[in-house]
Image: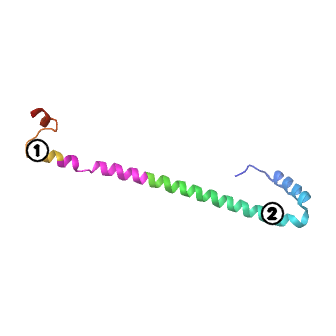
């Protein structure tokens, strides 16, 4: 996540020890760890929600494409025109 080496971690630990003291340092480390875990969990939840939304959109798009491919209305209209003897929908306007 962060590009921090062991030297930087050691320096941060020494500064934290000097600033907080040996009594408060363990509590501060626990609090920092808990906050980091909460932040990671929140980020993970956001990523999962985005992935679910993208998957749902992809499924909807696939359903629309499939429905458009199997839409029988054009075939039904053509069969009705054929049965009634009409050649095209525009030819009706030309006869009137």
Q: Where does residue 29 sit, x and y in percent of width and height?
A: 80, 63
Q: What element carries label 2?
A: helix
Q: Neighbour class for label 2 at 10 Å: few (<14), some, many (≥20)?
A: few
State the separation of the CA atoms marked 2 and 1.
81 Å
Which range is magenta?
58-76
Q: Neighbour class for label 1 at 10 Å: few (<14), some, many (≥20)?
A: few
- 89 horizontally vs 24: left or right: left
Q: Where does residue 94 sit, x and y in percent of width and height?
A: 12, 32
Report which quarter residue 10 is drawn in: bottom right
Tell me which label, 2 or 1, sits earlier in the chain: 2
The residue lying at 61 percent from left, 58 percent from top is 44
Residue, far top = 94
Q: State yes or no: residue 10 in magenta.
A: no
Q: Mark 1 points at which residue?
A: 82
Q: In which quarter of the image is the C terminus?
A: top left
Q: Where does residue 37 sit, x and y in percent of width and height?
A: 69, 62
- 40 horizontally vs 94: left or right: right
């Amino acid at each position: 996540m962060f590009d921090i080496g062991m030297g930087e971690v050691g320096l941060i630990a020494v500064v934290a020890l000097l600033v907080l003291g040996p009594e408060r340092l363990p509590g501060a480390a626990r609090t920092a760890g808990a906050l980091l875990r909460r932040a990671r969990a929140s980020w993970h939840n956001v990523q999962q929600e985005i992935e679910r939304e993208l998957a749902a959109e992809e499924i909807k798009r696939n359903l629309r494409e499939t429905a458009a491919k199997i839409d029988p209305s054009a075939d039904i209209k053509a069969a009705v025109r054929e049965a009634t003897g009409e050649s095209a929908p525009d030819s009706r306007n030309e006869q009137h």
